[in-house]
Image (cartoon, rainbow, N blue to C red):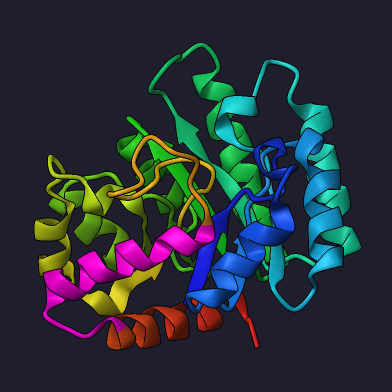
Amino acid sequence: MIDTHSHIYSEEFDADRAEVIARAKAVGVEHVVLANVDSATLEPMRELAQAYPDFCSMAVGLHPTSVTADYHAELERVESELKRGGYVALGEIGIDLYWDETFKLEQIRVFEQQLQWSIDYQLPVIIHTRKAFAEVFASLSKFKGAGLRGVFHCFGGGIEEAKKAVSLGFLLGIGGVVTYKNSHLSEILQEIGVDSLLLETDAPYLSPVPYRGKRNEPQFMLETARTLSTTFQLSVEKIDEITTKNAKKLFNIR
């Protein structure tokens, strides 16, 4: 299994990071993609990837909730990191209007600049969107035919958004939410198909049942795989095989 979206470099794991990684490996997690947030998370992310080069890959990008009126310095840092190299994706990037629309226009500008860089550097994108599917799709439409590819991280839309994302060549990142009793995600995914999915955790957030409310970590991704096994009437091993293949292809993981 590959955890395609994790923040295990964050301070929530400072006390037991090595043990977290050992537990992940023990249940079959072979690799983790570390998603960046902003300039403040670059150094801890890089330190972890350097400590575990065979287990961790890095993405770089400016998260929409870190966008302010003065976003230019943050974007310059992202561009500098891209020139430096060593990243498997632009991420996580996107538009988030769930809590606040104050910097909506700035979020759109930042998102579209990073989409352009994904094309320039031939990297996939990891898209974060909350209450902003229309805006995200509008931005993506400006790059039609340019070779954009990537994943809608922690997919939380309905069937129409899922179909639209897949029609554009994107994968859907599935984590702990699919295990929640009040979630309708499994029904949506049955219409989409397992071949368009990736596994992820978003650790330390969104722990699956039966760990909901606790700190999430990569080992818990096994519960997500088990739920998808039931959803698609496939073995956990087959879910692992398909999603791992998708992850390796998208992020060029060997």
Is residue 232 in the magenta section? yes
**Residue 184 appears in view:** yes
Q: Position of residue 79 (x, y in %)?
A: 82, 49
Is residue 172 in the magenta section? no
Q: Position of residue 228 (x, y in %)?
A: 22, 69
The residue lying toward the viewer, choosing from 63 and 105, is 63
Q: How many numbered dots are placed on residues in this image?
A: 0
Q: Position of residue 139 (x, y in %)?
A: 45, 44
Relative to residue 131, is residue 32 drawn left or right? Answer: right
Residue 222 drawn above or below residue 62? below
* Residue located at (41% from left, 63% from top): 221
**Residue 89 appears in view:** no
In the picture, residue 25 is in which quadrant?
bottom right
Relative to residue 37, is residue 173 drawn left or right? Answer: left
* Residue located at (62% from left, 48% from top): 7
In the picture, residue 100 is in which quadrant?
top left
The residue lying toward the viewer, choosing from 173 and 133, is 173
* Residue located at (17% from left, 63% from top): 189
Residue 148 drawn above or below residue 66? below
Residue span colored magenta: 218-236
